[in-house]
Image: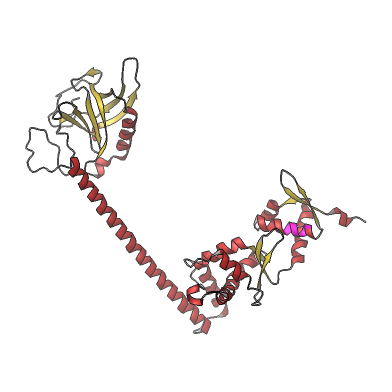
Amino acid sequence: MDRFVWASGLLEINETLVIQQRGVRLYDGDEKTKFDLGTVVLSTHRLLWREQKKHDCCIALLLSQIIFFEEQAAGIGKSAKIVVHLQPIPPNKEAGPYQSSKYSYIKLSFKEHGQIEFYRRLSEELSQKRWERISVSQPMQSPGRSQAGRVRAAGIVGIERKLEEKRKETDKNITEAFEDLSKLMKKAKEMVDLSKLIANKIKDKQGDISEDETIRFKSYLLSMGIANPVTRETHGSGTHYHMQLAKQLSGILQAPVEEQGGMMALTEVYCLTNRARGMELLSPEDLVNACKMFEALNLPMRLRIFDSGVMVVQLQSHNEDEMIASAVETVSERGFISSEEYAKLVGISVLLAKERLLLAEKVGHLCRDDSVESLRFYPNLFLTRD
């Protein structure tokens, strides 16, 4: 108890109330004190005890004086307690209720419960150590000292002041966020304009740019996602818009579809396209309508719909017989295979792997075994027998 000092009970500037609990008695070690049935207050900087009847009696303890604390469970006729172990007395300690004590710890006895939440909040404050980052603007003084000129954040005025400070801080953060967003959009516009300029130079073959360099640069533009997308604002709406969009999609999807073996699920096409278009996102309906225009425009892509309803984009040069033969050969070598295993083996999605195997089954080269374990495909042995 000799670590406590007299206090007025008001919070200092920059000191924030954390939690308070009524009906708390203070113990000096294991001995009872005269500080009985008061309100214990936890702030970001101090632990205060204030008498409930006489509000002018208040003592305070700096949180920096606490080494550690522990719970003491309630017993028969005994209240639950929090035992607080303290640092040695600082040399510049102000006057307090005790000049000396043989104990290096105190106890907070909770007569009206509430010790669980108080223990949790005290743990948070000691772990965060906010008193090290936010210093109070006025030093703590005893009641005997002059209180002239001191401004304290207490009561309704203190609450209003803190709310105003939080509002100003929020406004500042929002303003800075919008400034950063404006700078980002300005830089993005500059990058788009630059890409258009270079793309036009490549198109017009201005300068000494080889064919390989042209292809490489276009690939960079696509991977960066800063190509000039076809939009309704630039190409209107309806059929004309879908025709221009189909032409652009055909150019964008050529290389990725070839890497996938000549076929790509429409869901993957949707993700790939919108990733390349940046903020000019494409709706699923517009994507389907544009893909339907591939054949009419004689583009190297085709939209295909399987019997199961799965929609894919495939190359016009895609050879279905070769795809079926490859699937049959793989199944024959392994004896049987599931769509998951085939997808992992070939390097395509499970959806496309299943459609390839079903297509081979449809033409009679494979048979299926649909069980609770999985859907497996086997070679059709009837084709090998007379």
Rendering colour mode: secondary structure
Number of marks: 0
In the rendered image, the residue lying farthest to the front is 238
Q: Quadrant of residue 26?
A: top left
Q: Quadrant of residue 43?
A: top left
Query: What x and y, as percent, mark residue 130?
Result: 27, 41
Q: Quadrant of the C terminus?
A: bottom right
Q: Quadrant of the N terminus?
A: top left
Q: Is residue 130 above or below residue 345?
A: above
The reply to whether residue 228 is visible in this rendering is no
Q: Was residue 357 drawn as part of the magenta stretch in this picture?
A: yes
Query: What x and y, as percent, mark residue 50?
Result: 19, 29
Q: Choose between 67 and 126: the one closer to the eye.
A: 126
The residue sitting at 11% across, 42% down in the picture is 150
Tell whether 261 sits left or right of 218.
right
Q: Quadrant of residue 23?
A: top left
Q: Is residue 243 above or below residue 103?
A: below
In the rendered image, the residue lying farthest to the top is 76
Q: Choose between 53 and 376: the one closer to the eye.
A: 53
The reply to whether residue 58 is visible in this rendering is yes
- Give the magenta-colored segment's residue range: 356-361
Q: Is residue 80 above or below residue 338?
A: above
Q: Choose between 51 and 190: the one closer to the eye.
A: 51
Query: What x and y, as percent, mark residue 316?
Result: 69, 72
The residue sitting at 23% across, 44% down in the picture is 134
* Predominant SS of the magenta segment: helix
Query: What x and y, as percent, mark residue 146?
Result: 6, 37
Q: Was residue 130 drawn as part of the magenta stretch in this picture?
A: no
